[in-house]
Image (cartoon, grey):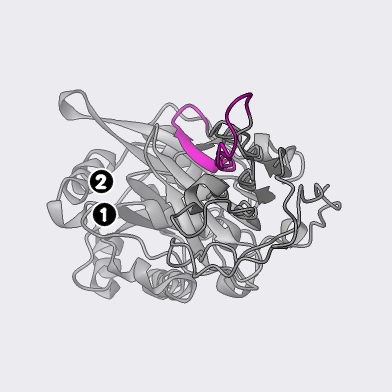
Amino acid sequence: MADSNFIDYVKVLCRSGKGGAGSRHFYRAKYVPKGGPDGGDGGRGGHIILKGNRNMWTLLPLRYRRHIFAGNGQSGSGGRSFGKDGDDVVVEVPCGTVVFDAETGEYLCEVTDDGQEVKLLRGGRGGLGNWHFKSATNRTPRYAQPGEPAVEKSVILELKLLADVGLVGFPNAGKSTLLSAVSEARPKIADYPFTTMEPQLGIVAYRGNRSFVMADIPGIIEGASEGKGLGLRFLRHIERNAVLLFMVPADADDVAAQYQVLLNELEQFNPQLMDKPRVLAISKSDMLDEELMHEISKTLPEGIPHVFISAVTGQGLTELKDILWGQITDDRNRIEEIPITHRPLDGHHRVREEDEFIFEPAPVEEEDEEIVGQMLDEDEGEWDDMEWEYNPDDDTPDSGK
């Protein structure tokens, strides 16, 4: 995967901007003694925002952009002048991108629609200037709030392709051949296992100028949920599919047993996949006669639609499209009606070379001034009770910040 342009897993270090400090300025003008406090508020720090882009299909740009830092807010000044807000950073990602905490593996957010914006990290709020704290009993407050600090977090971005039908099967089950037969996609096809090294998408034409999207992922082998083969790395893509199409070749020793092995691997990966509608296709059926098809049908699990197909001769492809279209258009199978529960990242779901990526030390700017009050409560979003420390013996007004 190192030489491929399809990147669906990347680790990035993000940091929002810190808030600017409030000003401790006092108004001074000729013939205006005791002008009073007029220190302005500090500007807020910049946000880190993710924006969906339907024209992107890979996380490749982020592979060469490991650090994403937003701008810091500027400090306030005299005359109740507010500091400038820090610049936001908008990161465009493909639709279907999911974000996890790189340290804990906890699910954070996802971007599914074109143009959708998700605030990944919030910038620090600016501090209040000293004019906010004047009162009848405290006419010369010589203190102001500092800005809220920046938020730094290492995150992992996973891309889960948006498709209506996902192909699931062992290597050399005929998944790529089927995709090339029913769509204009041209995946690599060969007679050795794991020919497909990355997911492929194809648009399948249907009756009445209608169509649906089919996704092909690398073959799954027994033990894939424990890290064997390539399938585990790409099983994340079928979490977005409305229908799962299982493919078992007709020359298999036991079609029902192979289907059950595939089903068990999906259940161990994410139990929620068991709630998705399933269709079973027996590929390479041009080698079978009517009697063999009848015998195989007796061994197949009940309640799962099945069809015998051959991508080479075109046998059963029209019937397969009809079954898939009926499952896709069923209101009960819509993705909106069945929200996805993203499993947290664990040792089996991580990509080793990305998870072990070490960031170079990021530059940290020195604080503009000493913290003189308590910070914002990040959970409640409200200022805590402030206990300000200042020197009452200092009668010289601070004309700066």
Which circle marks residue 143 in the picture? none
Q: Specify whether residue 174 is in view.
A: no
How packed mark 1 is, by other alpha carbons closer than 10 Å (few <14, some 14-19, many 20 or more), is many
Name the residue rendered at 58%, 70% in the picture. Answer: 387
Tell which of 91 and 85 is nearer to you: 85
Is there a contact, CB below 8 Å, between mark 1 and mark 2? yes
Question: Which residue is tagged 1?
Answer: 307
**Quadrant of image for the C terminus:** top right
Left or right: 128, with 29 as reference point: left
Numbered disc 2: secondary structure: helix
Residue segment shown in magenta:
29-56
Numbered disc 1: secondary structure: strand
Q: CA distance from mark 1 to mark 2?
A: 7 Å
The disc labelled 2 sits on which kind of residue? Leu
Left or right: 21, with 92 as reference point: right
Where in the figure is residue 301, as x and y percent of width and height? Answer: 26, 73
Kindly report the secondary structure that dominates the magenta region of the rendered protein.
loop
Where in the figure is residue 200, as x and y percent of width and height? Answer: 51, 40
Q: Specify whether residue 185 is in view.
A: yes
Where in the figure is residue 68, as x and y percent of width and height? Answer: 68, 42
Tell which of 298 and 290 is nearer to you: 298
Name the residue rendered at 47%, 76% in the picture. Answer: 268
Question: Which residue is tagged 2?
Answer: 320
Name the residue rendered at 46%, 67% in the picture. Answer: 379
Where in the figure is residue 229, as x and y percent of width and height? Answer: 65, 63
Name the residue rendered at 51%, 41% in the picture. Answer: 50
Tell which of 138 and 49 is nearer to you: 138
The disc labelled 1 sits on which kind of residue? Val
Q: Is residue 190 above or below residue 218?
A: above
